[in-house]
Image (spheres, rainbow, N blue to C red):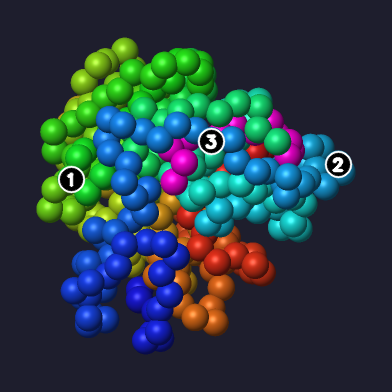
Amino acid sequence: MLPKESHVKHFGLPSFAGCAAAAALAACARTQMPATAPGIGLTTLAPIVEPDRRGSWMAAGAKANDLLYVSNENEVVVYSYPAGAVVGMLTGFTNAVGQCTDPSGDVFITDSGANAIVEYAHGGAQPIATLPAATSSPVDCAVDRKSGNLAVTAWGTSGAAGNVAIYPHAAGTPATYSNSAFLHYSNCAYDDKGNLYLDGENGSFDFEFAMLRTGSSTLASVSLPAGISSPGGVQWDGRHVAVGQWIDPRIYRFSINGSQGREVGLTIIPSAYYMYQFAIVGKTLIVPNKYYVHVYDQEADVLFFHFPSGKATKILKGGLTLTQGLSVSL
């Protein structure tokens, strides 16, 4: 689903040169996400410079509530969940993208522009840890609730492949895994057995999907039958792997047997423009409605649906400009 307006604004992202026609925008846009920090190569990463986070704040009593964290360009907006009242703001990011939480409620946020993963305690206004990314432009993350390991996908650069890095117990030096079919690695999620699933794109910008089984050192390709055109998020819904599509947003559910996936369900999301990531909390689906090419005079928002029916239930608006990842800290 594409914006109807003809005037668009880019927030430090690569130019859409060659995408002159609106009909070609979707195909061209897939090659642009997410923004890669300029001048940073695959093996030489910029050192982490401690950002100014003096603007971060959290309301008194926020720690006692469930919280929804929403990445919004260079900040993260924190809401009470499920009420949706703003209770905090985390600042100092270069480009806050993906998010994940651990069983204690700690929130990990990938800062793609700073090549870092920043950890916050539930309801905390200042980081408790910062991990350097193994490869340029970290995108998404996931915590294995069995081992405590942290997985981080990296987009890489336009000419050098990314990978997925596994930090033991969310600390220290990670082990990295790659698959020759992938150029860019996007979103990831663990299931309840510690298997890791991730999506991405190959060199022709076609969708790819892979799985790192518990105890394995091989990131193995998985064939999905749905014909997904673009990475739009990966989550574990408690029974199946939920895989999103960024353009023409929808969420497929698959059971995985070996190297094959079998479709077991589909949720259509007609009211979203672009869905790069999503969260599933029980019977609630939360979608950051992302205007990757931001439209003048329109704000981004966060959409709530019943899962898996896709029936809209609520919308959060106000002050959001370029929503990307989100997470719920319980």
**Which residue in the protein does label 2 denote?**
61
- Percent across and percent down for residue 61 are 86, 41
**In this picture, residue 315 sits left or right of residue 97:** right
Q: Earlier in the sequence, mark 3 or mark 1?
A: 3
Q: Which numbered disc, 3 or 1, marks the residue closer to the eye?
A: 3
- Residue 197 picture quarter: top left
* Residue placed furthest toward the right: 60
Mark 1 secondary-structure assignment? loop
**In this picture, residue 123 sits left or right of residue 4:** right
- The residue shown at (18%, 74%) is 18
Residue 252 numbered tag = none
Amino acid under disc 1:
Gly
Asked whether 172 or 38 is in front, the reply is 38
**Which residue in the protein does label 3 denote?**
49
- The residue shown at (37%, 86%) is 6
Asked whether 161 or 268 is in front, the reply is 161
- Percent across and percent down for residue 265 are 35, 51
Range of the magenta residues? 113-125
**Is 75 one of the magenta-colored residues?**
no
Q: Main secondary structure of the magenta part?
A: loop
Q: Residues within 10 Å of mark 3 (few under 14, many from 20)?
A: few
* Contact between labelled residues 2 and 1, with CB atoms less than 8 Å apart: no
**Which residue in the protein does label 1 denote?**
159
- Percent across and percent down for residue 330 are 68, 37
**In this picture, residue 100 sits left or right of residue 176:** right
